[in-house]
Amino acid sequence: MNKKGIEPVVATVLLIVITIAAVALIIAFVVPFVQRQLSTADLCLKAQGIQIDPTATCYSYDQGSPTNVTVKVDWSGQSEAFTLSGIKISISNSTYTASPEWEEENLPRAPGESRTAVFKGVVNGTITQISIAPVIGAGRGKLITCEMRSITPQPC
């Protein structure tokens, strides 16, 4: 019997070529994914200056009537420009969480600016937590919602 096989040098070269092709395919998919994640993290890092002012954020509650909530947001400490497209807000009592709309005219427009918004009758009872998350414009109509930041408000 005359058996023929692949020469060891040819087999080694084939393995190297297949490995390089596999690495190239993995890089083609992984690199853009990592770049998108880093871009999102960078934008949200810039938005760290968007904070709830705990001294000016409070709620008023009369027994049997809806609770009114006043939320003051400060934009401080940021010199890098980004587009603040909105603020997601969450107002919670012990049993319910409301997510009212934050009106565009109540958005701070630049570092150093503060804005106050009043939300009337969004929940009943004592407010246990207020959370905000900046919504950043990332170009081409894409919006990124950053991490929520929370406080426990006091009665007005």
Image (tube, rainbow, N blue to C red):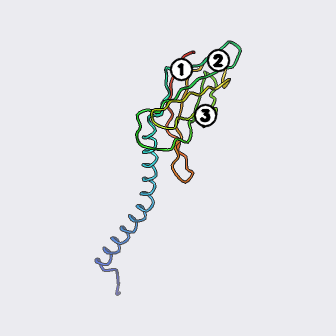
Alpha carbon separation for disc pair 3 and 1:
18 Å
Amino acid type at circle 2 is: Gly
Q: How many marks?
A: 3
Amino acid type at circle 1 is: Pro
Q: Are marks 3 and 2 in contact (CB under 8 Å)?
A: no
Amino acid type at circle 3 is: Trp
* Residue drawn 36% across the image and 68% down it: 20
- Under circle 3, the secondary element is loop
**Residue at the disc numbered 2:** 125
The answer to whether 123 is drawn above or below residue 143 in the figure is above
- Under circle 2, the secondary element is loop
The answer to whether 114 is drawn above or below residue 142 in the figure is above
* Residue drawn 52% across the image and 43% down it: 136
Residue 83, percent across and down? Answer: 51, 44
* Residue drawn 52% across the image and 51% down it: 139
**Residue at the disc numbered 1:** 153
- Which of the two discs, 3 and 1, sits closer to the camera? 3
17 left or right, relative to 134:
left
The answer to whether 88 is drawn above or below residue 91 in the figure is below
7 left or right, relative to 154:
left
Q: Earlier in the sequence, mark 3 or mark 1?
A: 3
The answer to whether 1 is drawn above or below residue 136 in the figure is below
- Which of the two discs, 1 and 2, sits closer to the camera? 1
Viewer-nearest residue: 107 or 147? 107
The quadrant of the image that shows the N terminus is bottom left
* Residue drawn 62% across the image and 32% down it: 99
Residue 124, percent across and down? Answer: 67, 20
Q: Earlier in the sequence, mark 3 or mark 2?
A: 3
Alpha carbon separation for disc pair 1 and 2:
13 Å
Residue 126, percent across and down? Answer: 61, 17
**Residue at the disc numbered 3:** 102
Q: Earlier in the sequence, mark 1 or mark 2?
A: 2
